[in-house]
């Protein structure tokens, strides 16, 4: 076999390389439709819910209704063992000031609420949900707006 033949044959025998997976991502299935997608590694490891479209997210949130609570227990919603400590740390970090409108606890005459940027129930581990980076201090009125916006602001990933 001549050298020229070899060069002609070689590319034909090589299998096409696997499509490289972007670094720092993992595959997860959409919690709504089940299609697979690449999500950032930290997100894939810490979260238990993933969505590819507003429709999938909406369908899930509509289905995930909170169970009815007994009136006496309404204030004891579980937020993880370190919740009180982490909420206090978040309020201190934010200088006891609403991160959205700037209202202070002194002006409000009460403690600020502490909001989970990514919903608490989406995390596998409550401690990850309660990391300072996922918490912001807000006044009750900004908190209501944020809770409503959460439904439309959580990240979506394209199926791949
Ligand atoms: Zn989907
Ligand atoms: Zn506010």
Image (spheres, grey):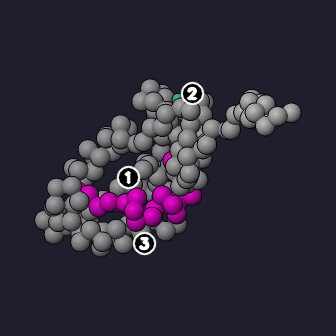
Position above or below: 79 against 51: below
Between tags 3 and 2, which lies in front? 2
Determine if the C-beta at disc 3 is less than 8 A from ligand 2. no
Residue linked to disc 2: 33
Give the x, y percent position of residue 48.
57, 46
Magenta range: 122-139
Q: CA distance from mark 1 to mark 3?
A: 17 Å
Residue linked to disc 1: 117
Residue 54 appears left or right of 113: right
Residue linked to disc 3: 85
**Residue pictured at 58% horizontal, 53% vertical:** 45
**Residue pictured at 54% horizontal, 32% vertical:** 159
Q: Nearer the viewer, residue 152 or 15?
A: 15
Q: CA distance from mark 3 to mark 2?
A: 37 Å
Dot 2, crowdedness within 10 Å: few (<14), some or many (≥20)? Answer: some
Q: Nearer the viewer, residue 71 or 85?
A: 85
């Amino acid at each position: 076999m001549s050298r020229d033949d070899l060069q002609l044959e070689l590319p034909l025998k090589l299998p096409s390389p696997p499509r490289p997976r972007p670094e720092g991502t993992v595959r997860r299935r959409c919690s709504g439709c089940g299609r697979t997608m690449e999500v950032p590694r930290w997100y894939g490891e810490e979260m238990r819910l993933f969505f590819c479209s507003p429709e999938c997210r909406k369908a899930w949130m509509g289905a995930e209704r909170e169970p009815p609570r007994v009136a006496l227990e309404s204030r004891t919603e579980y937020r993880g063992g370190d919740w009180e400590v982490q909420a206090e740390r978040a309020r201190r970090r934010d200088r006891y000031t609403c991160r959205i409108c700037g209202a202070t606890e002194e002006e409000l005459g009460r403690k600020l609420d502490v909001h989970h940027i990514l919903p608490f129930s989406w995390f596998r581990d409550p401690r990850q949900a309660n990391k300072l980076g996922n918490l912001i201090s807000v006044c009750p009125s900004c908190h209501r707006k944020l809770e409503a916006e959460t439904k439309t602001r959580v990240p979506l990933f394209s199926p791949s």
